[in-house]
Amino acid sequence: MEDEKLKYLSRINIFSDLDKDTLQKLDKITPMVTVPRGAVITSPGDVDSVLYLLKRGRVRLYKTTPDGSEITLAMLGDGNVFGATGSLGLGNPDMYAEAIQSSLVCAMREEDVASLIQRNPAVGMRLISLLSQRVRELEEQVESLSHQDVEGRVLRLLVHLADDFGVADRGYTRLDVPLTHEEIATMVGSTRETVTTTLSHLGRLGLVRTGRREIAINRERVTEWLNAKSN
DNA sequence: TCATTAAATTTCT
DNA sequence: AGAAATTTAATGA
């Protein structure tokens, strides 16, 4: 029972270098909560700044535009972290975090994160590399938005999601993250309807396989297709 | 090429 | 049944 909880903690990416003793202490100050699908974990105007540890599940980070539409900035999986918009400056405060599937989350006060990093610099290094990955992805997203059509943007996104969530499935790489066409649209700057037609077109080409809240891609063909397209 | 509008259809709870 | 997700089609910028 206790061991189970510790396993989860050690699977948090930034904690993977910590010894059992330290993990045990952390466990005591980070109560674990299950959040249902659709629940918003953080939203703009949150009072205290805490770092959320995503032990198991899928969380979508997004913000809203003045006209009410959403822009998705990141999709997080097991072991990732979010929140901490105070002194750590991990992202900006006007952001929402929504569990897109039932998730196991725990919260850690920012002061505790800071002192932990002072004692264990490896945690800081891990945090930096996690953030770097997120920045790199955002850069690619911007680049894609500015010079690719919807089809290209969707394909680039699917390849990226395959890197993070891909599992082998009957010759394809299935994305182990439940996405609606609507959500995909908020990641590629398009609309639900256009995403639908784009995906079914890609399906006819044999590049992807789709189901309700499920997408699989043929990595080889997709990368091949993307290369042919940009040249 | 793609957003918008409108409407139908399929699949979940 | 009702809600949510997906699909199709027509139109105009």
Image (cartoon, coloured by chain):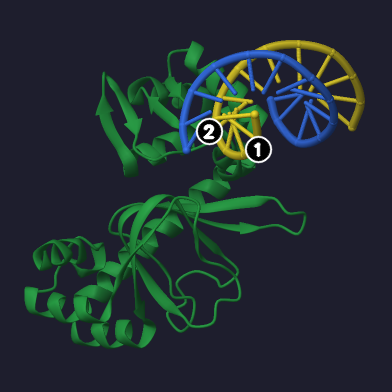
Chain colours: A green, B blue, C yellow
Task: Specify the amino acid type for callout 2.
Answer: Val
A165, A142: nearer the viewer: A165
**Where residue A138 sits in the image (x, y, percent)?**
50, 53
In screen coordinates, is A124 left or right of A38?
A: left
Q: Mark 2 lies on which chain?
A: A
Which residue is depicted at the point 33% across and 44% down? A164
Q: Do the residues labelled 2 and 1 touch (CB within 8 Å)?
A: yes
Structural crowding at the residue carrying mark 2, measured as other residues with C-alpha within 10 Å and reported as few (<14), some (14–19) or many (≥20):
many
In screen coordinates, is A20 left or right of A46?
A: left
**Residue A160 lies in what quarter of the image?**
top left
How far apart, in angstroms, are the residues tagged by discs 2 and 1? 9 Å
* Residue that label 2 marks: A154
In screen coordinates, is A121 left or right of A49?
A: left
**Where residue B3 sits in the image (x, y, percent)?**
76, 36
Task: Specify the amino acid type for callout 1.
Answer: Ser
**Residue A188 lies in what quarter of the image?**
top right
Which residue is depicted at the point 67% across and 36% down? A191
* Residue that label 1 marks: A190
Which residue is depicted at the point 15% across and 75% down? A23
Sequence order check: which comes first, mark 2 or mark 1? 2
Residues beneath discs 2 and 1 located on the same chain: yes
Marker disc for residue A101: none
Quadrant housing the N terminus of chain A: bottom left
Q: Is residue A83 above or below residue A139?
A: below
Q: How many labels does the image show?
A: 2
Kindly state the secondary structure of the residue where label 2 is placed.
helix
Kindly state the secondary structure of the residue where label 1 is placed.
loop
A139, A170: nearer the viewer: A170
**Where residue A119 sits in the image (x, y, percent)?**
19, 86
**Where residue A41 sits in the image (x, y, percent)?**
48, 64
Q: Is residue A203 above or below residue C13?
A: above
Structural crowding at the residue carrying mark 1, measured as other residues with C-alpha within 10 Å and reported as few (<14), some (14–19) or many (≥20):
some
